[in-house]
Image (tube, rainbow, N blue to C red):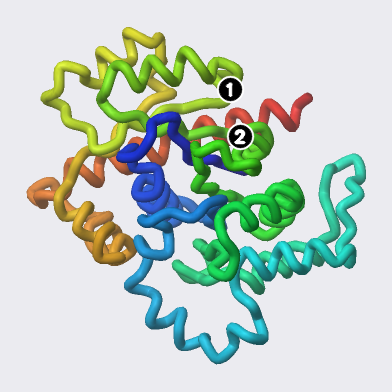
């Protein structure tokens, strides 16, 4: 399964923090192996959200020059022509390509969640151009290595974003509680509605533009929309790079915990996304 996290809103949509939250929580809830990738540079990149783990990442720094962890290494390998991407009837490329994905990734949760850092040596335009030429191969090889590929997808007209939105099984559209921005999505992106679910970021249940109103106004059925409530402790974890620790510490918290309602809604969001991804995947397999 390939799942893109994306928003048509410019900034403040919570795509990266929501992706981190959902991917970690789903790894705790299910037995899937998942991998995280991003197709753009950004100030609040996934690596920063996971920064606490950088110490263990850097223990392998001596190996960087040999293993070339990250997207650059993958693109360089796939550009050599050594890997067979001529698909058979099952649309599976050369199994060896998934080994490249494994070599280039960093393990976030033991044998269940991996992360491929974006390029650090190239400017955004060059990186995007190189990624554009290889993104289909990367997505297909990732699908062999992992059960789920999550993509933090740019909305800034990146060349690779259009391909990603076309290729993925499911698009998680991150909404903010702003009627103009929500309407902007429905006015401009109706072509992908058939594979979209919706996640309301930093949700405020006391807002006049609440979940019920958004669902009714835009005819979004309950199984296709969920919320990630605003939670100050989670936002601190995002800024400090301790999201894994926050979720590990609170995932099984009891009702008396101040984070109980946040975790409850996160679990609902995970179930909503997984149910829809599996349903879409099963439909595609039956065709």
Residue 254 point in image, percent of width and height: 15, 51
Q: Which mark sits nearer the N-terminus, 2 or 1?
A: 2
Tell which of 19 and 135 is nearer to you: 135
Tell which of 6 and 19 is nearer to you: 6
Q: Residue at (25%, 13%) from the top-left corner?
A: 213
**Quarter occupied by residue 56:** bottom left
Q: Residue at (52%, 30%) from the top-left corner?
A: 276
In the rendered image, the quadrant that contains the N terminus is top right
Q: Residue at (52%, 86%) from the top-left corner?
A: 60
Residue 82 point in image, percent of width and height: 89, 67
In the rendered image, the quadrant that contains the C terminus is top right
User: Element type at marker 1?
Assistant: helix
Q: CA distance from mark 2 to mark 1?
A: 8 Å
User: Element type at marker 2?
Assistant: helix
Residue 53 point in image, percent of width and height: 38, 74
Image position of 229 with respect to 118: above or below = above
Residue assigned mark 2: 165
Image position of 79 with respect to 18: above or below = below
Q: Residue at (62%, 64%) from the top-left corner?
A: 71
Answer with left or right where residue 67 lies relative to residue 184.
right
**Do the numbered discs 2 and 1 sit on residues whose CB atoms are within 8 Å?**
yes
Residue assigned mark 1: 192
């Amino acid at each position: 399964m390939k799942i893109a996290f994306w928003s048509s809103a410019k900034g403040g949509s919570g795509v990266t923090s929501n992706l981190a939250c959902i991917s970690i929580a789903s790894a705790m809830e299910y037995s899937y192996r998942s991998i995280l990738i991003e197709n753009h540079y950004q100030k609040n990149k996934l690596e920063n959200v996971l920064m606490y783990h950088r110490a263990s990442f850097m223990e392998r720094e001596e190996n960087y020059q040999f293993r070339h962890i990250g997207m650059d290494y993958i693109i360089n390998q796939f550009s050599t022509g050594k890997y067979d991407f001529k698909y058979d009837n099952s649309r599976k490329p050369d199994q060896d390509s998934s080994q490249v994905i494994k070599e280039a990734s960093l393990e976030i949760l033991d044998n269940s969640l991996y992360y491929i850092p974006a390029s650090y040596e190239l400017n955004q335009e060059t990186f995007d151009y190189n990624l554009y030429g290889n993104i289909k191969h990367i997505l297909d090889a990732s699908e062999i290595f992992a059960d789920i590929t999550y993509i933090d997808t740019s909305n800034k007209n990146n060349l690779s974003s259009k391909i990603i939105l076309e290729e993925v099984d499911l698009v998680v559209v991150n909404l903010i509680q702003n009627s103009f921005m929500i309407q902007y999505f429905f006015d401009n992106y109706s072509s992908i509605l058939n594979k979209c679910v919706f996640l309301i970021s930093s949700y405020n249940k006391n807002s006049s533009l609440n979940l019920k109103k958004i669902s009714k106004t835009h005819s979004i059925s309950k199984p296709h929309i969920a919320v990630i409530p605003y939670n100050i402790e989670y936002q601190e974890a995002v800024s400090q790079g301790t999201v894994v620790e926050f979720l590990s510490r609170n995932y099984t918290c009891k009702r008396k915990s101040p984070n109980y309602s946040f975790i409850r809604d996160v679990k609902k969001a995970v179930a909503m996304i997984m149910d829809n991804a599996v349903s879409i995947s099963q439909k595609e397999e039956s065709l």
